[in-house]
Image: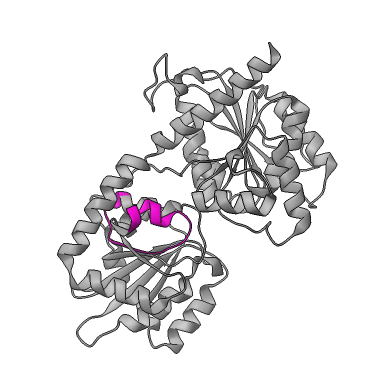
Amino acid sequence: MARGPAISGAAVGDHVNPPAAPVRSGGLRIGSGDDLGRLCGLRIAHLIETNGPGGAERMLVHLASELQAAGCYNLAIIPAGGEGWLPQQLAGTGVTVETFQLDRPLSPAFARRLTSLLRYHRITLAHSHEFTMAVYGAWAAWRAGIPLVTTMHGGRYYAHHLRRRLALRAAFTVTGRVVAVSRDLAGHLSRDLWIPAGRITTVGNGVRPLRAEGSLVREELGLGPEDRLMVAVGNLYPVKGHRHAVDGLALLQRPERSVHLAIAGRGDQDEALRAQAAALGVADRLHLLGLRADVANILAGADVFVLPSLSEGLPIALLEAMFTGCPIVASDVGDVRAALDEGRAGILVPAGDAAALARAVSALLDAPARARAFSARAQRRAMQEYDVTRMTARYAAIYNDLLSEGQSGAS
C-alpha cells in the first residue's frame, strides 16, 4: 500500500494512490452554471489543528462532506491520536484522512512535509482552520503554488501574544481569502492584526437540520412531567460559561417548580461544576451528560436551550437548537444577536449574568405560548439562513473567485 510523506516524523494515515475526484452520486443539487457545480473535480485539502467535537471540527465535517458529495476530492489533514472524533465523523463520506503530530510550536520540517503532502495528493486549493494551520498552511500552500482560504472560528487566543499576532498577520499576507465566522470576530481580526476590514470575509456557519421523532432524555434523567429541563450543549471549558448556568439553576428553584440543567459536553470543569452545584444545594438537579452523539434527542426533551458562553463566534450548538425549534436563552456575544434576529428568535442576556439568564428562562417557562412563538421564529430563521447548503455555496463562491484570480494572473 502506498504511503504519502510522513509529517514531522509522525504517523500519517495509510492510503492508496490519490484517486480521481469521485463521481457525484447524491447530496447537493448542482448545475452547470452555479458556483458549486464549477468546483466538480477540484482537489481540496482541509487543515485543522484539533481533533475533538468542537465547532470548527463540526464545520469542517459538514463542509468537506458536502463538497465530496458535489464531486470534489477532499483531503482532511488532522492531528493524530486524541479521541479520533474527526475520522469517525468522516467515515463513509469518501473524504481522505491524513494525520500528523506536531511536537513543537515552530517546526520548519513540519511545514516542508506538509507541502509534500499537498503535492502528493495533487491538491488544487487548501483551506486552513484556526491559528496553527493558518500559519503552517500559508507557508505550505505558498510553497506548493496553490491558493489558500483560512477560516477563523472565534477564539482570540492569539490576541495577547505579540509573536502570534505577527505570525498570523504575516500568514494572512499570502492567504488568498481570510474568513471569519462572525462579524464580531472579523472586526477583532482587523483591529488585532492591523489589516484592512475589507480583507476579511464573513461566512456564518451552517449545520444539517436535526430531527428527532421523540426524546428519551427525560426518562434517562428520571424527570417527572412536572419537572422543567434546561439544556446546554458545549465542552466543559471556562469560556463556555457553564458556571453561570449553574448559578442560574439555583435561582430558578421554586416550591411549585423543579428545574433541572443537563449539559452535553466533555472537558476539565466537570468536578468544579459538581462542587458548585452541591454548594448551591442543586447537586441533584445538575446532570453532566458527557460527550453525546444524540444531540437531537437531548434538545427534543428540553423546555429551554441555554447558551451561557462568555465568548463565541457563531456557535454550532445554537444553530442546532434553532433547527430543532427549542426555545432559546443566549448570551449576547459574537454573532448570536444576528443569528437570533436581534432577539426576535430568542432571548438575549448579558454574558456572565446568571440573574438575567434565570429571569429569561423563568419568563419562557411561565409563558408557553411566548416560548412557542420564539421557537417557531428561530426554526424559520435557521432554515432560511443557516442550512449547511447555504454555507457550502458561500465557500464555493469564494473558492471560484480565488481560482479565477489565479487563472487571470497566470494568463
233 over 66 or under it: above or below: below
Which color scheme is applied?
Answer: one colour
Residue stretch in magenta: 323-342
Residue 40 in the figure: left or right of residue 44 = left
Seen as rendered, the residue at the extreme left is 369
Question: Which residue reaches farthest right?
Answer: 108
Q: Position of residue 23 (x, y in %)?
A: 47, 17
Q: Residue at x 26, y 58 (%)?
A: 215
Give the camera-side residue of 405 and 93: 405
User: Which quadrant does the N terminus fall into?
Assistant: top right
Q: Position of residue 201 (x, y in %)?
A: 54, 39
Q: Any magenta on residue 121?
A: no
Q: Quadrant where the C terminus lies?
A: top right
One can see residue 2 in this view: no
Residue 160 place in picture, x, y as percent: 70, 62
Describe residue 106's horizontal placement relative to residue 384 as left or right: right
Left or right of 29? Residue 121 is right
Residue placed furthest toward the top: 411
Residue situated in front as seen by the camera: 164 or 260: 164
Total tally of numbered discs in the picture: 0
User: Which residue does the image show at 25% across and 85% down from the upper left?
Assistant: 254
Residue 370 seen in this snapshot: yes
